[in-house]
Image (cartoon, grey):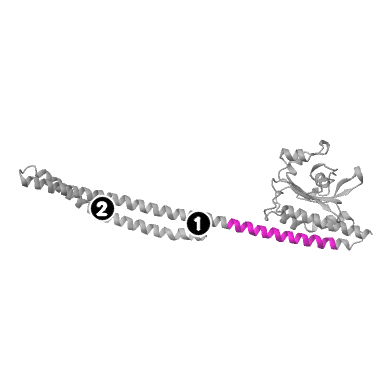
Amino acid sequence: MSAFDDLDVRLRPNRRGVIKKFSERITALERLRPWLVAVGVVGAFVAALGRVFEGTSGIVLAITGAVAAALGGGFVAAIDYRKLELGANLTEAEAIAEEAIARGRAVEHERNGIRTDAEALDRKRLALIDANRTMREALEQVLLVPEATLDQAANAMLQAALRFLVASVGFDQDEEWAISIFQVQGEGEDAVLRRIAAARADRLTERLDARSWKRNEGFVGAAWVGRRDVIIEDGDDPRVREDYPIPAERRRDYDDRRYRSMAAIPVRLGPGPQIWGVVAASSDRKGRFRRDPGNRQVQTVDTVRGIARMTALMAAAFERSRR
């Protein structure tokens, strides 16, 4: 129970007490009504009687009766007005109290919402820290195995930290999401982005063959060639389809549904402009990934950038081990 619920409960007996006092005051006033009516009737009778007498006596009786009748009627009218005034004051006071409680509840609800959002953000930040730590530890363990391949290292790193990555992004249970690590393979015009590691909401599809992407094909191909982050808030936007075309033979029926929002982050290796690969994360939820640098509460893209940094560290470690 909130403080305003408690206040509402406390006001109820007071409201009943006010109504009781109001009723008692009205009853007291109503007790005067018969006497005032009687005064008015007597005054009217005296005024009428004044017509019987002539001269000064008749005039005095008429004036006295009229004054008495006016006083009786005036007091009755005053009682009725006072009743209306008391009722209006009571109604207004009750309305003000209810409005104050309603506003207080709204402020309390907003404050609780802010607190809930802050707690959720704290959990996401802690999850991101745990994800970075776990990926680094998994990478260290894999590097101790001489026979480990790059693909195995990437998958081990991704799977070890997966629960923290999911919590950091905030994927929902019924959300169709995917996280993929692509490596540039081949030379010149034959170079493509090939997926070497993946994690999906549907775990059974992680090992299925994935599409490779050439330069400027789709979101990951654009991130590769442009050497920049590609953040898509809504893939259904016609402008997005124009800016990131996919050849008809490479499209799938589920693309529009599965890749509604996406973040593709290039993996840079070394101080030069070399692009080693691309880390991509997608969701079927509009707005899951978006550019919002002024909002510190948005860390979905930061999570993907963290995977890209760890992937670069992994790639550098493997290159050094080959020397």
- The label on residue 231 is none
Q: Real-space Cα distance between discs 1 and 2?
A: 39 Å
Q: Quadrant of residue 16?
A: bottom left
Kindly state the secondary structure of the residue where label 1 is placed: helix
- Of badges 1 and 2, the one in the foreground is 1
The answer to whether residue 316 is magenta is: no
From which residue to which does the magenta span run? 112-140
Q: Is residue 188 above or below residue 86?
A: above
Within 10 Å of the Cα at label 1, are there few (<14), some (14-19), or many (20+) other Cα atoms?
some
Is residue 203 or residue 188 the one in the foreground? 188
**Residue at 46% from the left image edge and 55% from the top image edge:** 100
Could you say where residue 103 lies in the image, as x and y percent from the top left?
A: 50, 54
The quarter in which the C terminus is drawn is bottom right
Could you say where residue 50 lies in the image, as x and y percent from the top left?
A: 9, 44
Please say if the residues under marks 1 and 2 sit with CB atoms less than 8 Å apart: no
Q: How many marks can you see?
A: 2
Question: Which residue is outermost to the right?
Answer: 323
| Residue that badge 1 annotates | 104
Q: Quadrant of residue 143?
A: bottom right
Say what amino acid the circle numbered 2 marks: Glu
Could you say where residue 301 lies in the image, as x and y percent from the top left?
A: 74, 52
**Residue at 83% from the left image edge and 52% from the top image edge:** 267
Q: Is residue 142 above or below residue 77?
A: below
Q: Is residue 67 above or below residue 322?
A: above
Relative to 280, 82 lies left or right: left
Kindly state the secondary structure of the residue where label 2 is placed: helix
Question: Which residue is outermost to the front?
Answer: 272
Say what amino acid the circle numbered 1 marks: Gly
The answer to whether residue 125 is magenta is: yes
Could you say where residue 113 lies in the image, as x and y percent from the top left?
A: 59, 56
| Residue that badge 2 annotates | 30
